[in-house]
C-alpha cells in the first residue's frame, strides 16, 4: 500500500466522556493543532490555549521586565534535554522558553517543554518522605521525616553490604540524566545489579550501529544538509530521543528542497510531514532496506570506490548476498510495491553522498530489530554517504567530551561481585560493548520471580516499571511480593504504579529544581556541554539524589563515604566544570558551553595519523592495521589503517573499516550458543507469517507528541490536550468484523509462539476493553495503541479523575480548584503494557514492542 501524505493527520483521536459526543469539537482541533505545531516548530503556542492553572495570569509574560529573572537550564520532559530559560518572578517559575545558545535545539522548545510549570506546581506532587502503613500496595501512607527515612534505608543497605552480598541490592533506573552520581553511588556500594531501560528503548539500534561502525552507537544524520532522507520508523515529528533538534533540521531540509520518504505502519505526523509515506507491515523495514541494497548493487549505483576503500566485505560478495532480497520478495512481505522500492533506491543513490537514513523504534523494537537496523545502516555505506556532509553521520561523544571534562575524583572502581540478571548471558550482545552495557531490563522481574537472583533491597529511580515495562502486571505482582522483594524504596517526583508498591517513597526534585551536567548526541556534529540548574528552590521537602546519595553513603559507611568528599553539589560541579572557561559561574550564566574551535565530525575516518601517533607504532603488512601500545586488556591497541599509502584513523572497528560483515557478533553468539548472522539479513517473524484470520492483528505502540510516558501525565496542561488512546484500526479490516467507529472492542493478546523467547508458548496473555477509531491511516493488519495513557495511579490528572477522591497521603493538602474543571474526567484511557509479552530480540535482548499477536472482537 502506498499513499501520498497530503493532509496532516490530527494524530489524536477524540475520547468520549460520559454523555459527550464522539466527534472532535473545534476546541479539540485547535488544541491538537497547537500542540502538533508546537512540537514540530518549537513554538510556545500552548500559551494561547492552555489553562493557566496555578500560575496567576498576571505573571505570564506581562510583568515588568525588571522583576523577571531568566535562569538557563535544561529541559527533561523528555530525553532530548533541550536548553531552556526559566523565567522567574518573585521566586515563581512563570514561563519556559528555549535557550538560543543550545546548538542542538537552537532556542526551540516543544509543547512539553513549555508545560514545565504544570509539573513543577502539580498540586498532587510528592513533597514529603512516606512510609507505608498498610500492606504493600494498600495505598496507606504516613509522612515521615528525612531522618527516619535515611536511618531505615541506610540500615538495610549497610546490613546487605556488610554481609558481603552487595548484588542483593538492586537498583532500577529509567531515563536517567544523572548517570555520574548514580554510578558513583552504586559502584561505591559495590552492587552490579544496576538495571537500566536500554533494552526497552534503543538497544537494537545502538547495537546495530556500534557493530557496524565502532565509533558510536548513535546516528546523527546531517539532515539539514541532506537532499534525501529515508525514514524507517522514526517518529521524529512527535518523539525521537533528539526530537526538537531533529525536527527543526528536517523542516530546514524540506525548505531547501530535500525529499523525505517515510516507512511507517500508520500515518503519524512524521509521515504526514514527509513527501511520501509507505504503510509497512511491522518488522519488515530491514527487508525493504535489503531490497534497496539489491537494486543499488545490481544496477551498480553504489559508490564503488568508497566501498572498496572502507568496507570490510567485497562489493561483489555483498551483491551476491543481497541478490535473494529482490524488490518483489520485499513487496510480498512488507506490502510496499516493488517498483517504489526500486525507484527510491535509485533516487537515494543518485542523491548520495547527501543522502541519509534515519531509523528508530519503528524498525528496531522488534524481534528482528537488530538485523533490521544493521541492514538500514549499511545502505549508507553502499552509497558512500557515511560521515559526509548531508549524509549519515555520527559523533564519538554521545554527550559531552568526557576526556576534556572528566568526572572529578575519587572515582570508585567497578563492582567485582556478579549478578545473574545484570549479566543476562542468554543475550550475547546485551553487555558486549564496553562502557555501553544494555542489560535486558524486561526480564528482571521474571527472573526475580523465578528465583534466579536473590534480592534483599530494591531501589527504583526515574522509572515507572510497573506501568512502562511489558507484562506490567507481572512486574506489579513481583513488586507486591515481600518474599521476593523484602524492601523497596522508590524515588520519584510523582506518585506512580511503582511508588504504589514501595515501602518508602522519597520525594525527588523535578528537573526544574535540580542540578546535572548534561548534553545529548550533537546533531550539528560538534559536542557541547550543558548545565541543569535549579530554576526555583525545591518545593516541600523534595530532594535531589545528589543530596540523598552522599548522605546515604555517609550513613552506610564502610569506605563508601570517601567517594563523596564535597560538602555541596555546587562544590562538586565547580570541580566538574573547572576545565570549562569561566567554570561553573559561566555555565550558570549561559547554560551551555561550546568550544568555538571545534569542527563538525565529518569523515572522521579520513583523519591522517600524526607523526606523534605513528612514532613507535606497528603496522600489519597484510591488513594495513596500525597498532600502538596496548589496551586495558593488554591487547595491541589499533589506532588506524593504511589506505592507498596513507596512514589514517579509519573506523574504530577491529578491521578499522565499516563492518558489513561483523565477525565480532558471530564470536559473541558462539560463546552464548546462539547463531548470529555476520551479514545483515531479513529474519521473518514466525508469528507474522501466513494468512491472518480476519480477527487477528499485530498490535503496535506509539508515542504522542505532547506526552512522555509518566513524566507528563500529571501535567494538567498536557492532559487537557491529549488524555485518551483509542485503538487505531483500518477501516476495511474493521468492516469485515462488523466494527464501526467508536465501538467497544475486546483485545486479547498472546505470547509469541517461539522457543527462543522466555515463556514463548503462544499462550493467551491479557485482555483489554477499549474503543476503536477507524482510519485509512493504519496498516490493515495492525491495531495501533498509544503508549501514553492508562494510568491507575499518579494523581487526578494522570488518571483522568479516577484517582481523585482516594487520597493516599501524598502531595500537598492544598485543594486544587482546577479539579472541578476537569472536563475530560472519566475519558477513555487504557494501559497497553499488561498485553505486551516479554519479548527480547534473541541477539541483544531488545524488547519487541510492535510484534504482539492479538485477536479482537466487538464487545
Ligand atoms: N512525545 C514524546 N517524545 C519522546 C518520548 C515520549 O514518550 N513522548 N520518548 C522518548 C524516548 S524514551 C524514545 S526511545 C523516543 C522514541 O522515538 P521514536 O522511535 O521515534 O517513536 P515511537 O513512537 O516509539 O516509535 C516510532 C514509530 O514506529 C511506528 N512503527 C511501529 N512498528 C513499525 C514498523 O514495523 N515499521 C515502521 N517503519 N514503523 C513502525 C509506530 O507507529 C511509531 O509511530 O522518543 C523520545 N521522545
Ligand atoms: N507500550 C509501550 N511501552 C513503552 C514504550 C512504548 O513505546 N510503548 N516505550 C518504552 C521506552 S522507549 C522507554 S524509554 C520507557 C520509559 O519508561 P520510564 O523510564 O518508566 O519513563 P518515564 O516516565 O520517563 O520515567 C519515569 C519516572 O521519571 C519521573 N521523573 C523524573 N524526573 C522527572 C521530572 O523532572 N519531571 C517529571 N515530570 N517526572 C520526572 C516520572 O515521575 C516517572 O515516574 O518506556 C517503555 N515502554
Ligand atoms: S523535545 Fe524534550 S527536552 Fe526538548 S523541549 Fe521538548 S520535552 Fe523538553
Ligand atoms: Mo526510550
Image: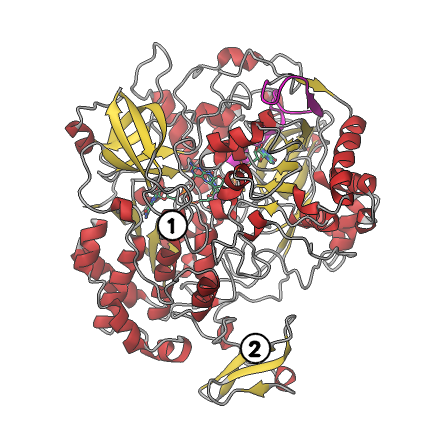
Q: Which residue is mark 1?
A: 756
**In the foreground, 697 or 843:** 843
**In the foreground, 767 or 144:** 767
Q: Check disc 2 and report its element: helix, strand or loop.
A: strand
Q: Residue 206: give x, y in percent of width and height.
A: 47, 56
First-in-chain label (2 vs 1): 2
Judging from the image, the colouring scheme is: secondary structure
Q: Determine the CA span between mark 2 and mark 1.
A: 36 Å
Contact check, label 2 and label 1, Cβ < 8 Å: no
Residue 631 sits in which quadrant? bottom right
Q: Which residue is mark 2?
A: 638
Which label number is shown at residue 105? none
Q: Residue 708: give x, y in percent of width and height.
A: 49, 36
Position above or below: 212 against 417:
below
User: Could one spot residue 158 in this view of the protein?
Assistant: yes
Q: Residue 699: give x, y in percent of width and height.
A: 32, 37
Is 690 placed left or right of 512 in the picture? left
The span picked out in magenta is: 112-138
Residue occupying image coordinates x 22% and y 45%: 4
Amino acid at each position: 500500500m502506498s499513499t501520498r501524505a497530503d493532509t496532516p493527520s490530527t494524530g489524536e483521536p477524540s475520547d468520549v466522556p460520559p454523555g459527550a459526543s464522539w466527534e472532535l469539537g473545534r476546541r479539540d482541533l485547535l488544541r491538537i493543532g497547537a500542540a502538533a505545531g508546537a512540537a514540530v516548530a518549537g513554538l510556545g503556542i500552548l500559551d494561547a490555549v492552555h489553562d493557566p492553572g496555578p500560575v496567576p495570569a498576571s505573571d505570564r509574560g506581562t510583568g515588568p521586565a525588571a522583576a523577571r529573572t531568566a535562569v538557563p537550564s535544561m529541559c527533561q520532559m523528555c530525553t532530548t534535554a533541550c536548553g531552556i530559560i526559566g523565567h522567574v518572578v518573585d521566586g515563581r517559575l512563570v514561563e519556559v522558553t528555549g535557550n538560543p545558545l543550545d546548538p542542538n535545539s537552537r532556542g526551540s522548545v516543544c509543547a512539553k517543554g513549555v508545560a514545565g510549570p504544570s509539573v513543577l506546581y502539580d498540586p498532587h506532587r510528592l513533597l514529603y518522605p512516606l512510609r507505608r502503613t498498610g500492606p504493600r500496595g494498600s495505598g496507606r501512607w504516613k509522612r515521615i521525616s528525612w531522618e527516619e527515612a535515611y536511618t531505615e534505608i541506610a540500615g538495610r543497605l549497610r546490613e546487605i553490604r556488610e554481609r558481603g552480598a552487595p548484588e542483593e541490592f538492586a537498583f532500577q533506573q529509567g531515563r536517567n540524566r544523572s548517570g555520574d552520581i548514580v554510578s558513583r553511588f552504586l559502584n561505591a556500594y559495590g552492587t552490579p545489579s544496576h538495571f537500566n531501560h536500554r533494552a526497552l528503548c534503543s538497544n537494537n539500534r545502538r547495537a546495530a550501529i556500534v557493530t557496524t561502525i565502532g565509533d558510536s552507537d548513535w546516528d546523527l544524520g546531517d539532515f539539514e544538509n541532506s537532499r534525501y532522507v529515508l525514514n524507517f520508523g522514526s517518529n521524529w515529528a512527535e518523539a525521537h530521543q533528539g526530537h526538537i533538534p531533529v525536527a527543526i533540521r528536517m523542516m530546514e531540509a524540506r525548505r531547501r528542497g530535500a525529499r523525505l520518504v517515510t516507512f511507517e505502519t500508520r500515518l503519524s505526523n512524521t509521515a504526514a510531514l514527509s513527501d511520501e509515506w509507505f504503510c509497512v507491515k511491522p518488522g519488515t523495514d530491514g527487508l525493504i532496506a535489503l531490497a534497496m541494497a539489491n537494486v543499488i548493487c545490481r544496477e551498480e549505483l553504489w559508490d564503488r570506490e568508497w566501498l572498496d576503500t572502507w568496507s570490510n566485505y567485497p562489493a561483489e560478495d555483498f551483491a551476491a548476498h543481497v541478490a535473494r532480497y529482490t524488490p518483489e520478495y520485499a513487496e510480498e512481505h512488507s506490502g510496499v510495491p516493488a517498483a517504489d522500492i526500486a525507484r527510491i533506491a535509485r533516487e537515494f543513490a543518485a542523491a548520495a553522498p547527501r543522502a541519509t537514513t534515519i531509523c528508530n523504534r519503528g524498525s528496531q523494537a522488534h524481534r528482528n530489530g537488530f538485523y533490521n537496523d544493521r541492514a538500514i545502516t549499511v545502505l549508507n555505506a553502499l552509497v558512500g554517504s557515511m560521515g559526509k556532509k548531508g549524509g549519515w553521520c555520527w559523533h564519538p561523544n554521545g554527550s559531552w567530551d568526557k576526556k576534556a571534562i572528566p568526572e572529578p575524583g575519587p572515582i570508585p572502581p567497578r563492582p567485582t561481585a556478579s549478578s545473574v540478571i545484570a549479566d543476562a548471558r542468554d543475550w550475547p550482545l546485551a553487555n558486549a560493548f564496553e562502557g555501553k552495557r544494555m542489560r535486558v531490563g524486561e526480564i528482571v522481574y521474571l527472573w526475580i520471580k523465578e528465583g534466579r537472583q536473590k534480592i534483599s533491597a530494591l531501589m527504583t529511580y526515574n522509572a515507572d516499571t510497573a506501568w512502562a515495562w511489558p507484562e506490567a502486571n507481572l512486574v506489579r505482582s513481583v513488586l507486591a511480593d515481600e518474599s521476593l522483594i523484602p524492601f523497596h524504596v522508590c524515588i520519584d517526583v510523582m506518585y506512580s504504579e511503582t511508588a504504589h508498591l514501595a515501602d518508602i517513597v522519597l520525594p525527588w526534585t523535578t528537573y526544574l529544581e535540580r542540578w546535572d551536567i548534561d548534553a545529548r548526541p550533537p546533531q550539528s556534529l560538534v559536542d557541547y556541554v550543558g548545565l541543569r540548574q535549579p530554576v526555583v528552590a525545591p518545593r516541600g521537602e523534595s530532594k535531589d539524589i545528589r543530596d540523598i546519595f552522599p548522605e546515604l553513603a555517609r550513613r552506610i559507611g564502610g569506605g563508601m563515604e570517601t567517594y563523596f568528599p564535597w560538602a555541596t553539589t555546587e562544590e562538586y560541579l565547580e570541580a566538574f566544570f573547572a576545565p570549562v572557561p569561566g567554570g561553573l559561574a559561566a555555565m550558570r550564566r549561559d547554560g551551555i558551553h561550546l568550544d568555538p574551535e571545534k569542527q563538525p565530525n565529518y569523515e572522521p575516518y579520513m583523519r591522517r595519523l600524526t607523526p606523534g601517533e605513528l612514532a613507535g607504532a606497528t603496522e600489519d603488512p597484510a591488513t594495513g592495521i596500525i597498532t600502538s601500545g596496548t589496551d586495558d586488556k593488554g591487547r595491541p591497541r589499533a589506532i588506524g589503517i593504511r589506505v592507498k599509502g596513507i596512514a589514517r584513523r579509519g573506523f574504530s572497528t577491529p578491521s578499522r573499516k565499516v563492518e558489513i560483515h561483523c565477525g565480532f557478533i558471530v564470536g559473541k553468539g558462539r560463546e552464548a550458543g546462539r547463531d548470529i548472522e555476520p551479514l545483515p539479513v531479513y529474519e521473518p517473524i514466525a508469528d507474522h507469517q501466513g494468512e491472518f484470520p480476519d480477527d487477528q492483528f499485530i498490535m503496535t505502540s506509539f508515542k504522542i507528541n505532547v506526552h512522555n510516558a509518566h513524566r507528563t501525565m500529571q501535567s494538567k496542561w498536557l492532559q487537557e490536550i491529549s488524555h485518551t488512546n483509542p485503538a487505531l484500526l483500518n477501516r476495511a479490516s474493521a468492516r469485515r468484523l462488523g466494527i464501526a467507529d467508536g465501538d467497544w472492542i475486546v483485545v486479547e493478546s498472546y505470547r509469541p509462539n517461539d522457543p527462543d523467547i522466555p515463556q514463548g508458548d503462544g499462550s493467551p496473555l491479557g485482555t483489554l476493553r477499549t474503543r476503536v477509531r477507524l482510519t485509512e491511516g493504519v496498516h490493515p493488519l495492525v491495531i495501533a495503541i498509544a503508549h501514553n495513557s492508562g494510568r491507575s495511579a499518579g494523581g487526578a490528572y494522570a488518571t483522568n479523575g479516577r484517582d481523585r477522591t482516594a487520597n493516599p497521603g501524598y502531595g500537598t493538602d492544598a485543594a486544587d480548584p482546577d479539579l472541578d474543571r476537569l472536563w475530560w474526567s472519566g475519558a477513555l484511557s487504557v494501559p497497553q503494557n499488561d498485553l505486551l509479552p516479554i519479548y527480547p530480540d534473541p541477539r541483544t535482548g531488545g524488547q519487541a514492542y510492535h510484534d504482539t499477536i492479538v485477536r479482537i472482537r466487538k464487545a
